[in-house]
Amino acid sequence: MSSTLYIHLSKIGENLKAVNSQIGAGVKRMAVIKDEAYGHGMLPVANYLKDKAEWFCVARIDEAVRLREAGIKLPILVFEVPVKGKEHLYSTYEITASISDLYVFERLEPGTNCHLHFDTGMFRLGILPDQVEEVHQKIKKYSALNYSGIYTHFANADDPNDARVLKQLEIFKSIRAQFPEALLTHTCNSGAIFHYHDKGVIMDAVRPGICLYGFAPGTEDIPALSPVLEWQSELVQVKKIREGDEVGYGSRWKAPKDGWLGIVPVGYADGIFRNLSSNFNMEIAGEKYPQVGTISMDFSAVFLGDNFFPIGAPVTLLGEGELSAREWAKKIGTIPYEITTAISQKIKREYI
């Protein structure tokens, strides 16, 4: 086995049901499956969701083309600014472009489907609010484009009590009122879906991302969500160590007593962050054991104490509860998104 990610697709379905409970009937689900579905595998996740969602969202045009070539027929929105030289792919594959800057209007081919993306306070991609009149002029000039949607993105919706979310919402509403009612309108990322659904942010569609994979977008837990992936490896060596033996690069961990040390063939090249060294547990036979010593490129050590396990004994690295990516993220001051997207694509994925 060495190392395998088990992706429980049915849990994505359950997490989508949790989204549905927040948004009500008739609101379209634009499932965000960018960056290999946050490390879970874009094509298998898309095939599972193609009859459960109404749209897909990806970061790059190349991702959208892969989906089309794999037979995915749902509408696809691409977030990136259209790449020069690839503009024709939007019309060729019937993919929806984001217009996030005024110069994009002239770049797109006639007939291209597009959504207007306004920056209401994120200060990443997006047209600024004071450019609305210029947008109207561009729409008149480039009338052969198919303007079918309008959206914004919240910067602080991960926090359930941030007044800046409602400030962005008001700015967006003032912009939205200046465009045709027929445009598909969407604002909500995962945080907005769960923390602000009763504040007027739910419009024609929502864009669930990290929540589909079982993680709350911020620090506040959302019990209705369950992690989708389980990362398992195995022991490839078990050796006796004595009290005082120093383990790993830099000899940074010292055995507190005599016992057994297990070696697991997974390291930072596989996606275990090096600064998790000696700071998380692995599970073997239902019990938790501490990872010890500096994580190296291809291997990690686990202290088994008095318990001996045979070569090949299964080891769970990521799962639910204490073993979740959320807990790893807390330990190193990051977010679950970074943990799951960092798992190497060389790790075998199995879909359940």
Image: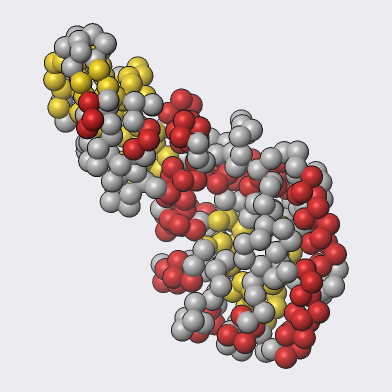
Q: Nearer the viewer, residue 35 or 10?
A: 35
Residue, x 50% and y 32% (percent of image)? Answer: 330
Q: Position of 200 compared to 107: left or right?
A: right
Reply above or below: 130 against 4.
below
**Is residue 92 visible in this depiction of the protein?**
no
State the quadrant of the C terminus.
top left
Residue 32 drawn at (x, y percent): 55, 56
Reply above or below: 308 against 27.
above
Reply above or below: 145 against 209.
below
Reply above or below: 212 against 141.
above
State the quadrant of the N terminus.
top left
Q: Position of 295 compared to 12: left or right?
A: left
Quarter residue 315 falls in? top left
Quarter residue 251 falls in? top left
Residue 335 drawn at (x, y percent): 52, 41
**Is residue 278 visible in this depiction of the protein?**
yes
Quarter residue 174 falls in? bottom right
Q: Position of 232 compared to 115: left or right?
A: left
Residue, x 73% and y 85% (percent of image)? Answer: 138
Residue 37 drawn at (x, y percent): 47, 53
Residue, x 50% and y 45% (percent of image)? Answer: 337
Q: Nearer the viewer, residue 108 or 133?
A: 133
Q: Nearer the viewer, residue 328 or 47?
A: 328
